[in-house]
Each structure stands twice: as structure tokens, then as C-alpha cells.
Image (spheres, grey):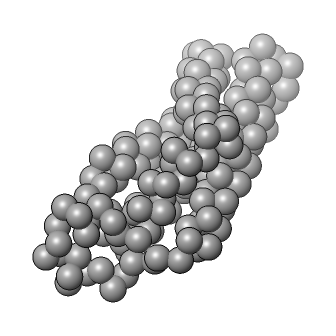
Amino acid sequence: MPHMLIWVQFFMVAMPTLWLVLGALENIRAPSANGNMVADALAMRPMRDQFPDLYAALGRNRIESPSAHRWAFIAIVTSESIVALVMLAGTLALLLAALGAIDAETARVLATLGVLGFTLIWSAFLVGGQWVHYWAGAEGAQHTHFMLTIWGSAVLCLLVL
């Protein structure tokens, strides 16, 4: 059964790895897609447009600086890219461990670090999103970040328990 566990861990880490790799590549290839959404969320534009009364009460948290928007997006893409590389290394290590080429515990540690990074990215989005109240006007993004945080947490549990 321990051999089966390493295969399960490999596949469970491989899927969010592929998701993040694709997301990071798309953010590099077409930065305006998510970059504009980050700018809108930070400036609280969806709330302003959809919930003007809430915006009047909460809009003081907005960040309107285009420079801050660019730097935030650069930080996001950099973090995603670094974590994606660590996750790729962890996924490869789990595959090698499943094939008996390397120690399983070493592979699990590397994979755990990558999945922890994955989970922290989405947790940080939730915390930052709370500052700009993105639940009002960008709730789809908030729901996605909740699901990704849960996905990462579930995989973390599988790796460390």
C-alpha cells in the first residue's frame, strides 16, 4: 500500500501543478487578461459600478495607482512562476519516487513545499481581496480563490498525513 500512496500523491500533485503552470504561462503570454482584472479589483471598480452605496462606504480601501497595479501583478506572476517551478520539481520527484529512483520522503518534502506555495498564493488573494472587498463585484474570482485554497489544502493533507 505505501507504493500505491506515492502514486496517488503523484497524480494529486500533478493536477494543481499543471493548473498553475498553465495559469502562469497565460499570465506571461497575455498579461492584460488577468492584469486588468487585478487593477479593477484593487481600484474597486466592480464594486463602484455594481454596488455604489457600498462603494461610498468602503471605497476608501481602493488602490488606484497604475504603478501599484503593475507591481502587484508582477509580484503575482513572479510568485506563481516560482511556485509552479517548485511544484514541477515536486511532481517529478514524486514520479521518480514512485518508480523507485529516489527516496519517497525527499519527494514528499519537495512536493509539500510546492503545494504549500500554491495554497498560500490563493490564501493571499483571499486576504488581499478582503481589503478591497472583492466579494462585492468580483465574487466569481473570490469563489475561484476559495476553491483553489481548498484544493491545495486537501492535497497538503494527503502529502503530510
Q: Is residue 119 visible?
A: no
**Residue at x 79% of width, y 21% of height:** 96
136 horizontally vs 91: left or right: left
Q: How many marks?
A: 0
**Residue at x 46% of width, y 76% of height:** 64
Q: Is residue 99 above or below residue 141?
A: above
Which residue sits furthest right?
A: 101
**Residue at x 49% of width, y 54% of height:** 36
Q: Is residue 155 above or below residue 80?
A: above
90 horizontally vs 7: left or right: right
114 horizontally vs 34: left or right: right
Image location (x, y in percent) of residue 72? 59, 66
- Judge by depth and name the residue closer to the eye, 120 or 77: 77
Give the quadrant of residue 87.
top right
Q: Quadrant of the N terminus?
A: top right
Q: Is residue 93 above or below residue 45?
A: above
Give the quadrant of residue 76.
bottom right
Image location (x, y in percent) of residue 23? 58, 38
114 horizontally vs 143: left or right: right
Give the quadrant of residue 55.
bottom left
Image location (x, y in percent) of residue 148? 44, 43
